[in-house]
Image: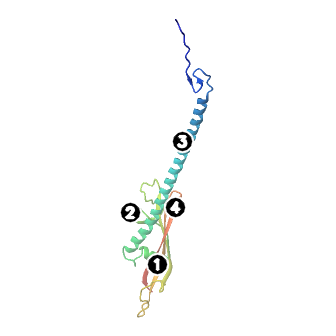
Amino acid sequence: MNKSFNYRLSFNGFSSMARQSGAALFISLILLLALTIIGLSAANRSNLQTRMAANMHVQNLTFNAAESAIGAFVVDSFTGDKLTPGHILFDLRINGNLSGVCYDSVGARVACAGVYLDGDRSGKLQAQLDARVLSDCNPTACGGFSLGLGGNRVGCRVFRVDGTGTLGVQSQSTSMWAYEITRC
């Protein structure tokens, strides 16, 4: 007795021999397209964040250069004899202002043409100082001092010192007010 059996596998009513309509291919292509869009968006965002970080780094460098110009002015003003020509405070008192004073990488006062803080001149990071006398021999600007005793009038000379740091086309500035007690 020979019996023949016909076996057909069936899953949820679909036979393994059923027609294939390509739904799996269509769904996989849609998923691939969605993943590609997500990947491109992530790459674009990463590129934007890299540019923002580089810009912030340049801003920090230029601000630090501006601060170093003011710091170099402070060091320069406390160094040497303030009554000799060439001293920064003497020049500021005589001229009323200083413009375009630059400092090199060791803090020396130099002309601004071609002087850069980074040494190799690749980035052209520059620290520049502008200073001017705002008030000369003002007795009310020096709070806490006995003014005008014995015919010797004491007053304050008020300076505004502006530091500018430049790197390429970007620059940052900062300011400081300085007082010098003087005999008028």
**Crowdedness of circle 3 by 10 Å Cα count: few (<14), some, many (20+)?**
few
The span from disc 2 to disc 4 (Cα, nearest Å) is: 21 Å
Mark 3 vs mark 2, CA separation in Å: 48 Å
**Quarter of the image where one finds residue 108:** bottom left
Kindly identify the amino acid type of the residue bearing the numbered disc 1.
Arg
**In the picture shown, does residue 157 fall above or below 42?**
below
Task: Evaluate if marks 1 and 4 touch, with contact meaning CB atoms under 8 Å apart.
Answer: no
- Asked if marks 3 and 1 touch (Cβ < 8 Å), the reply is no
Cα gap from disc 1 to disc 4, whole angstroms: 28 Å
For disc 4, the marked residue is: 171
For marks 3 and 2, the one nearer the N-term is 3
Q: Is residue 37 above or below residue 55?
A: above
Residue located beneath label 2 in the image: 106
Report the residue at 61% width, 31% height from top. Answer: 26
Q: Name the secondary structure under disc 3.
A: helix
Q: Give the label, 3 or 1, closer to the camera.
A: 3
| Amino acid type of the residue tagged 2 in the rendering | Val
- Secondary structure under tag 2 reads loop
Q: Which residue is mark 3?
A: 39
Relative depth, front residue between 23 and 1: 1
Q: Quadrant of the C terminus?
A: bottom left
Q: Is residue 175 above or below residue 105?
A: below
Residue under label 1, please give it: 93
Decide if residue 69 is in sight here: yes
User: Vertical placement of 50 versus 10: above or below?
Assistant: below
**Which of the marked residues, 1 or 4, is nearer the chain's N terminus?**
1
Residue 94: x, y in percent?
47, 78
Observer able to see residue 114:
no
First along the sequence among labels 1 and 2: 1
